[in-house]
Amino acid sequence: MSLDLFEAVKRKIEEVYPFLKVNKKREVVRLVYEILKSGIKPDFLFLPKYKNYEQLKKNLIAVRYPKSFNEYPLNRFYLPELNLKKEDSFTEKSDFIKIEEVVAEKSLKDSKIVSNIIKKYPDVKIDYIENFKSVKKSLDIAGYNKRSKRLYVIKENFDFLKRCPCTKKCLSCDYFVLNLGFGCPMECEYCFLQGYQNFEGIVLQSNIEDYLKKTIDFFRNIKKPIRVGTGEFTDSLVYDDITEYSVDIIKEFSKHKNIIFEFKTKTLNIDNIFNLPPASNIAFSYSLNPDKIIKNSEHYTPPFKERISALKKISDYGYSVGFHLDPIICAQGWKDLYRDMINEIFSLMSPSKIRWISLGTFRFKPDTKKVIENRFKENIILDEEMIIDFDGKLRYPYSLRKEAYLYILNLLKRKKMDINKVYLCMEESDMWKEVGLAPILKW
């Protein structure tokens, strides 16, 4: 449908605006395509008759961005060439997580991860290389689409722990990230990795003991509680049946009560964690969205109800739990969707059992938009207005973000949720103030 629409728009613009030069024509094609795809207008009857390009562009931007047009200058509207290719489209497959090839560094031939992969996939092809640095790096949609078929098993020597890379000008939540794993086999249409990852495959680090030692040494003399987690560049548990990272992490960090360790996940791959006694400083958080958005925009992830059931099971066992409403997707009817979702969460979970909740709206680097619209041509997540904001990322306009945060915070207050346990992810300090949140984060 979107490819047909794209071709129809190009033909129509040639017909109606033959005087436009190439670059100006590209901007008009994008604007008209987005107006029609998002359903703002049902047909071409809205096309203005101007022959002055600046007037024409301004009129089309006002139609496409009615909320943002008077809030932002024209240079904040991102209008790159629209170039949809059929061959770049994502195709859903039933065996998405089946591993066909393993590329391991030679020194790790007898490692636990390689041994576990062979047990689970006895027919898997294994190649050995000197080190991961020799792997060719390039950003390619076709390669990204095939990434889950290949695992790289490597030894990390440098990049163990870092502060969460909070966007410049945003208020930091003082979170630290353990960089275990890179790449995810799930296909969330909003995932930033599809515009960031530059090799075909998924990386698993074999030397978990080095990660643990570096982290403990780093925080040895820090008395206040420190929150650390995995899940920035991958789902924390998606490969846990192979890596068994959770077992090593829980065993070690349960001894260090000043470190609050968080696993962020969407998966149901949680069996390993019930083989250990729960510890008060070990937490599991689920990324949640309304089920309609999961069905439309998250491929290969468990349904909402299954995630909540898993979260309750983990909580009942004795671990701390939280959840992340990030990214909040302001698709059509989003208020009703999030209201129903929060009602369902708290019909199963007591607010007193929730250790923290993060809120963050959809955002990404501008170039990622071209990747999303090429891979997921029928997406609904790009239909809402998004502008280049304070940090150079595409975001919903300030007024819409504020509306979303206030609406969800009000829903949480009605459920008697302690708002001091709620924080914003990658947001301006002014937004925190305007929605009534204080950056006094007590983990």
Image (cartoon, rainbow, N blue to C red):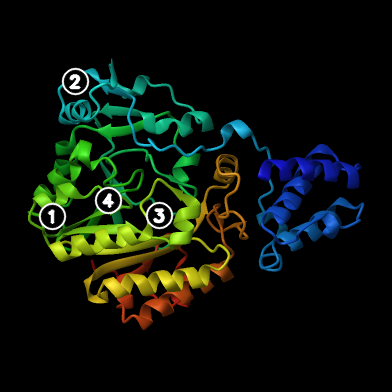
Judging from the image, what secondary structure is the residue with disc 4 in? loop
Q: Nearer the viewer, mark 4 or mark 2?
A: 4
| Residue 61 appears anywhere in the view | yes
**Residue 46: quadrant of the picture:** bottom right
| Cα distance between the residues tagged 4 and 2 | 29 Å
| Cα distance between the residues tagged 2 and 1 | 37 Å
Q: Which residue is mark 4?
A: 268
| Cα distance between the residues tagged 4 and 3 | 28 Å
User: Do the residues under discs 2 and 1 have CB atoms within 8 angstroms?
Assistant: no
Q: Which residue is mark 3?
A: 166
Q: Earlier in the sequence, mark 4 or mark 2?
A: 2
Label 1: few (<14), some (14–19) or many (≥20) C-alpha neighbours in 10 Å = few
- At x 40%, y 38%, the residue is 94
Q: Earlier in the sequence, mark 4 or mark 3?
A: 3
Q: Nearer the viewer, mark 2 or mark 1?
A: 2
User: Do the residues under discs 1 and 4 have CB atoms within 8 angstroms?
Assistant: no
For the C terminus, give its image quadrant: bottom left
Q: Which residue is mark 1?
A: 221
Q: Earlier in the sequence, mark 2 or mark 3?
A: 2
Judging from the image, what secondary structure is the residue with disc 3 in? loop
What percent of the width, then of the height, locates residue 258?
14, 60
Looking at numbered disc 3 in the image, what kind of residue is underneath it? Cys
| Residue 169 appears anywhere in the view | no
| Cα distance between the residues tagged 2 and 3 | 37 Å
Label 3: few (<14), some (14–19) or many (≥20) C-alpha neighbours in 10 Å = some
Q: Nearer the viewer, mark 2 or mark 3?
A: 2
Q: Which residue is mark 2?
A: 109
Looking at numbered disc 2 in the image, what kind of residue is underneath it? Lys
